[in-house]
Amino acid sequence: MPRLSRPQPPSTAPRSPRRWAVAGLCLGALPALVLWAPARWLAAGLQQASGGQVQLHEPRGTVWNGSARLVLAGGTGSRDQAALPGRMQWQLRPTWTGMQARIAADCCTTAGAPLQLSVSLGLGAARLDVADGLSQWPAAVLGGLGTPWNTVQPQGRLHLSTRGLAVQWASGRLQMHGQVQFDALGMSSRLSTLRPMGSYRLVLQGGSAPMLQLSTLDGALQLSGTGQWVGRRLRFNGEASAAPGRETALANLLNIIGRRNGARSIITLG
């Protein structure tokens, strides 16, 4: 009769010192990997998230403290690109509820006054707060975004100011509070020989239904209009016209930016 083997008790021998060393090395390397994550990882993530329209070229430093050249592009399949003059620097800091960011650009933000953003995350909700501030950007960089900017090829200065700006996403709804003001100063376009054509102001006012107001500060090209966000869509109605004596110089531009109705060009979105 065959002899049955008695089950052996589990081994109580200590783990190999090599296994402990490998485990300790992995645990020690993880914080270092997060802390020193290269800036190119942030560049790759931003490019993918924006569909290729926002790119960070020549990234240096880390995800948390770095710099790069900001490039706006037309996206996948487009050859349009425009780079911001100089470099952009950033600092990212995690918080208990999200992330804080400080962004400075050699060309566009005042020394000692970077753009300051704060992102808070919750269950099914997210909120972006932008500190009050003022920055100046070259309008030419918009040409890199493709149609219609590559046709208009705007030139001039964009002044951006924010006041109490907060954007919140909760329960499938997007809400905005505060105000954003764009001043487009000394604007010109390759579609017109008139330089400059004028200066304009675009104000976005938050609320239950955010409002958009376009007005002309000065110049031969007269722009005006109002808009409102309804759900996720912007509905805008405006018009463009030429100051007396400037109709010929602005005719080509007026034909492109809207639907001609006599001397006016009607602009409709949404």
Image (cartoon, rainbow, N blue to C red):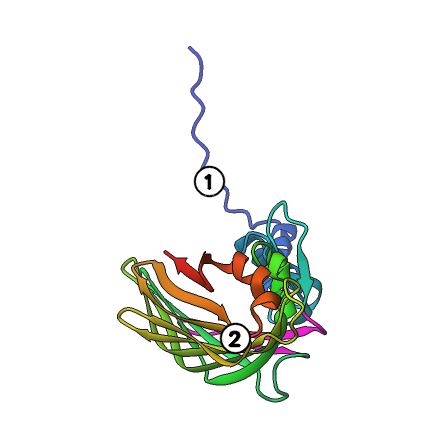
Q: Is residue 103 above or below residue 21?
A: below
Q: Quadrant of residue 202?
A: bottom left
Q: Which residue is mark 1?
A: 10
Q: Magenta residues: mostly which secondary structure?
A: strand
Q: Is residue 14 magenta?
A: no
Marks 1 and 2 in Cβ contact (< 8 Å): no
Q: Closest to the observer: 61 or 267?
A: 267
Sequence-wise, which precedes: disc 1 or disc 2? 1
Residue range highlighted in magenta: 84-106
Q: Give the x, y percent position of residue 16.
A: 62, 49
Q: Closest to the observer: 157 or 164?
A: 157
Residue at the image position 63 percent from the left and 57 percent from the top: 150
Q: Quadrant of residue 1?
A: top left
Residue at the image position 64 percent from the left and 56 percent from the top: 21
Q: Give the x, y percent position of residue 63.
A: 61, 67
Split into 4 quadrants, where in the image is the C terminus?
bottom left
Residue at the image position 51 percent from the left and 60 percent from the top: 257
Amino acid tagged 1: Pro
> Disc 1 or disc 2, which is closer to the eye?
2
Identify the mark at residue 267; answer none if there is no mark: none
Q: Is residue 178 left or right of residue 200?
A: left
Q: Is residue 91 magenta?
A: yes
For the question of whether residue 10 can be seen, the reply is yes
Q: Give the x, y percent position of residue 183.
A: 52, 79
Q: Closest to the observer: 13 or 114?
A: 114
Residue at the image position 29 percent from the left and 57 percent from the top: 172
Give neighbour class at mark 2: few <14, some 14-19, many 20+ (Cα, 10 Å).
few
Q: Which residue is mark 2?
A: 243
Label 1 secondary element: loop
Label 2 secondary element: loop
Amino acid tagged 2: Ala
